[in-house]
Image (cartoon, helix red, strand yellow):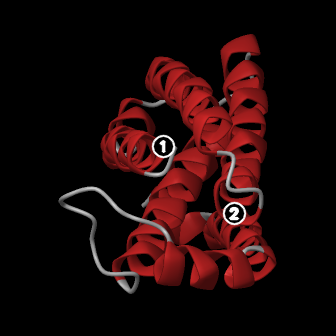
């Protein structure tokens, strides 16, 4: 019911978040190609095609949760959750640049630890406003955990 009545809010959050992801992908396309061709990767590294698919789904889920929070009654908790969403989205955006373009393996791993903490806080903040909005952040938290494993593996294998 909520989604049908407020589709413009959902569309705005989803398109805006997907645009951030697309811009990050665009800015790191050459670094990503170089990474695939020249960098040793840890076991369980998925094929390159998996990443844009997974991130596209995750960005949609993140934004869907943000739209639900945005549509909740105004409160300090709602405002704080949406600010936290924008902060974690900015941190998410810059990780790809650190990792692919700068090949700063250790710095990008530390950046991912920061992102993981922000996503954990985001999940909790969203849950306080809208339980479902918080639950749909779980795949994001799990993927960032997996990304940290991959990042740590790259750092260890390419020092």
How far is mark 1 from mark 2, CA to CA?
A: 28 Å
Relative to 97, say whether 81 is above or below: above
Classed neighbour count for the residue bearing mark 2: other residues with Cα under 10 Å, few (<14), some (14–19), many (≥20): many
Q: Residue at x 28, y 56 (%)?
A: 42
- Name the element at disc 2: helix
Provide residue 109's location: percent of width, then percent of height.
55, 35
Give the camera-side residue of 45 and 128.
45
Left/right placement of residue 143 relative to residue 28 reads left
**Circle 1 or circle 2, nearest the eye:** 1
Say few, some or many: other residues with alpha carbon within 10 Å of mark 1 (under 14 / 14 to 19 / 20 or more).
many
Report x, y in % for residue 74: 75, 26
Residue at 68% x, 56% y is 103
Q: Residue at the spot x=60%, y=27% of the render?
A: 110
Q: Residue furthest top?
A: 76
- In front: 36, or 64? 36
Provide the residue designation for mark 1.
155
Examine the image and state in which quarter residue 45 appears.
Answer: bottom left
Q: Residue furthest front?
A: 159
Tell me the residue that label 2 is attached to. 17
Mark 1, secondary structure of its residue: helix
Taking the image as shown, residue 123 lies to the left or right of residue 122, namely left
Q: Nearer the viewer, residue 33 or 142?
A: 33
Task: Indicate whether 159 appears above or below 42.
Answer: above
Residue 29 horizontal/vertical position (percent): 69, 83
- How far from the left and from the top, in percent, is residue 10? 62, 65
Say if 138 sits above or below 22 in the image.
Answer: above
């Amino acid at each position: 019911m909520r989604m049908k009545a407020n589709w413009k809010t959902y569309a705005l959050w989803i398109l805006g978040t997907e645009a951030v992801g697309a811009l990050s992908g665009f800015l790191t396309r050459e670094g990503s190609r170089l990474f695939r061709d020249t960098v040793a990767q840890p076991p369980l590294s998925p094929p390159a095609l998996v990443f844009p698919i997974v991130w596209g789904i995750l960005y949609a889920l993140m934004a869907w949760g943000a739209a639900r929070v945005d549509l909740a009654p105004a409160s300090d908790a709602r405002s704080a959750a949406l600010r936290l969403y924008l902060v974690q989205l900015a941190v998410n955006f810059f990780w790809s640049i650190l990792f692919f373009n700068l090949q700063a393996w250790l710095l990008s791993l530390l950046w991912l630890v920061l992102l993981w903490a922000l996503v954990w806080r985001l999940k909790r903040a969203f849950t306080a406003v809208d339980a479902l909005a918080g639950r749909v952040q779980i795949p994001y938290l799990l993927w960032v955990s997996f990304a940290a494993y991959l990042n740590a593996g790259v750092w260890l294998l390419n020092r």
